[in-house]
Amino acid sequence: MGLVLFIISLIENYEELYRNSPIGDFFRYDLFLIVTVSFLQLLITFLVFLTWNKEEYRLKETEIIHRKGMFFPREHSILLKNISSVEYKRNPLELVLGYGTVVLSHIGDRKALKIRSIETPEIYANFIKDAVDRVVDKKEISSKKLSILDLILEGEHYRLEFKQTFRYDIKKKDVSKFLEKAVMKTVAAFLNSNGGNLIIGITDNGGVYGLEDDYNTLVRKDRDGFENHFSQLMKNMMGAEFRQSVTLSFESIEDKDVCFIEVVTSEKPVYMRSNGEEEFFIRTGNSTSPLKISEVNSYIESHWKQG
């Protein structure tokens, strides 16, 4: 439209052209300009609205469909196998309003897909991660395929976490119930998410610390004593039935014992009991996060399919 008006302006003056037209006898030129420009602005706004309104995402077995627009919809998809990472973010305003953005990163250099302004984004992020894990044919993080040393070299990530000690507080030089709870929280989160591995005796930066200090806090100061205490904590805080989903093994690195804990996804929700209260934990990114009571049911419905 702008190009047409520009070409006309090269041929003849706008105002003279208008006054010589049939409608020039009925409307003043300045009024005509105001009405025309306003109409064009409304038309452009309306067309943009029709193009971008009604944005939706549909998660299918192998892809996510992104559809945008009401009357002139545009649709494209992203294959789940091409998603390299899933995370959620909250800016200060979203944090106040209880909303967030789920960011889906692509393999390669393509721009990340952002699902904006959704409630409880951590739940949707974990739901998408579940779907990605089901279709991506990737190397399993398992002691059968990778040694503990290989895993340590990978560094911490969504399905791998390090703990320097199990129950010994290095600064206070005493037993810490807080540290024990932190280990149990991570195990519960792996059970409620997609499983994962926890290595105790390794510092955050991948250094080997060992289990000797933990051993010395136990009645039986060896691997069996460590595993027995771990099993007792799980029984007290989660329930003995979930112990079958957790496997402990030990390996000596640099002449120091470390404990490798493999956790598979639980067949049902796991609540952790502490100080007379129940808590529900999941993995969000590289960390363990609690869910509010209002969020738990929604997560359970999405994570554990109703059969």
Image: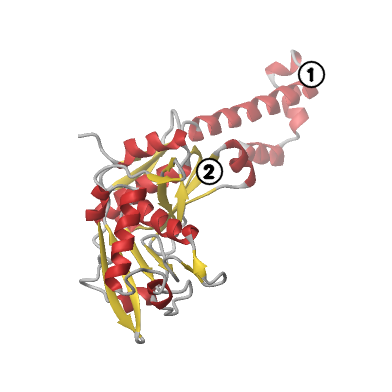
Q: Is residue 159 visible?
A: yes
Where residue 166 appears, as percent x and y from the top left, is 41, 66
Where residue 167 appears, as percent x and y from the top left, is 44, 65
Q: Is residue 57 visible?
A: no
Task: Name the residue rendered at 43%, 78% in the picture.
Answer: 209
Q: Tell me if residue 171 comes above or below residue 262 in the rendering.
A: below
Q: Which residue is mark 1?
A: 28
SS type, badge 2 = strand
What amino acid type is highlighted by mark number 1?
A: Arg
Q: Which residue is mark 2?
A: 100
What amino acid type is highlighted by mark number 2?
A: Gly
Question: Who is closer to the viewer here, 89 or 191?
Answer: 191
Q: Residue furthest front?
A: 219
Distance CA(mark 1)–CA(mark 2) = 52 Å
Question: Who is closer to the viewer here, 129 or 250?
Answer: 250
Q: Are marks 1 and 2 in contact (CB under 8 Å)?
A: no
Q: Tell me if residue 27 comes above or below residue 17 in the rendering.
A: above
The reply, left or right, for residue 30 in relation to residue 113 is: right
